[in-house]
Image (spheres, rainbow, N blue to C red):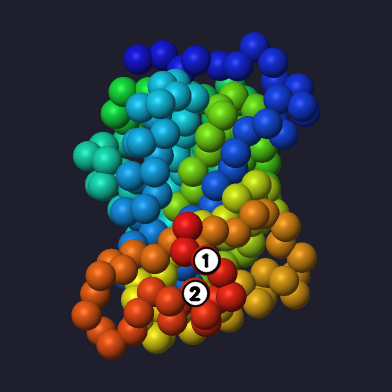
């Protein structure tokens, strides 16, 4: 399966691409499930135009969720002497029909090779060659996630229906305001039918956002 590269790699072309960062400060909220399903669904509609990036570089499960065994990873890409569009393309793994994946690292130690500067360089290169770049992030807000947020056109704020998740997500959203994150934000409520004494409307009120 080859990678279909856009013929127009200008700044205007890059600006038309969607860089969608999937975020939740609390682990177990379903970021990887949302990321993998969103990427697969988009790839069905836009085959060859979608790439998913596993930025949970230490303990990410995006490859596992997509039943992949990547030969090349983001950590290996970070160690190359020159990072350009061609080098990035060579480190992608074909997944389901029309979807490509940039896996994080083979182990937590290997992940140390990836810095925020690599993220800032690689995501725009992917946006030049793909219409949709879906980025799965780790719990919390590390420097790699912050670098990804600087490249975001859209931010999916993922929460499960419990007080801790919603409160953490609100704190993260407030932090985005303080540091000037500009991507459009959408609230995604996972396990919205959980019987925990909360209603989806409670999440909307706490986040001051409607559920997308």
In screen coordinates, is 110 left or right of 198? right
Judged left or right of residue 180, residue 18 is left
Q: Nearer the viewer, residue 169 or 207?
A: 207
Q: Would you name the residue on which mark 2 appears?
A: 204
**Does the image show residue 19?**
yes
Q: Does residue 94 appear in this view?
A: no
State which quarter of the image contains the N terminus: top left
Q: Residue at x 69, y 16 (%)?
A: 8
Q: Which mark is residue 89?
A: none
Crowd around label 2: few <14 · some 14–19 · many ≥20 (10 Å): some
Q: Earlier in the sequence, mark 1 or mark 2?
A: 2
Q: Helix, strand, or loop for circle 2?
A: helix
- Residue located 63% across and 33% down the image: 17
* Location of residue 172 in the rendering, given as x and y in whole percent from the top left corner: 58, 75
Where residue 198 sits in the image (x, y, percent)?
33, 84
The residue carrying mark 1 is 210
Residue 33: image quadrant is bottom left
Residue at mark 1 to residue at mark 2: CA–CA distance: 5 Å
């Amino acid at each position: 399966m080859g990678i279909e590269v856009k013929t127009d790699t200008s700044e205007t072309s890059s600006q038309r691409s969607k860089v969608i960062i999937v975020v939740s400060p609390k682990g177990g909220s379903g970021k990887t499930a949302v990321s993998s399903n969103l990427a697969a669904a988009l790839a069905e509609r836009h085959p060859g135009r979608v790439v998913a990036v596993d930025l949970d570089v230490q303990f990410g499960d995006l490859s596992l969720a997509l039943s992949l065994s990547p030969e090349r990873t983001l950590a290996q890409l970070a160690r190359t002497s020159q990072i350009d569009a061609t080098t990035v393309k060579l480190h992608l793994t074909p997944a389901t029909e029309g979807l490509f994946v940039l896996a994080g690292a083979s182990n937590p130690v290997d992940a140390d090779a990836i810095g925020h500067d690599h993220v800032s360089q690689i995501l725009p290169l992917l946006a030049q060659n793909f219409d949709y770049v879906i980025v799965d992030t780790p719990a919390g807000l590390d420097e790699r996630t912050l670098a990804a947020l600087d490249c975001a056109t859209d931010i999916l704020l993922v929460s499960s229906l419990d007080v801790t998740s919603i409160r953490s997500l609100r704190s993260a959203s407030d932090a985005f305001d303080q540091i000037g994150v500009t991507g459009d934000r959408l609230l995604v409520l996972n396990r919205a039918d959980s019987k925990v004494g909360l209603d989806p409307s409670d999440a909307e009120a706490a986040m001051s956002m409607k559920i997308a």
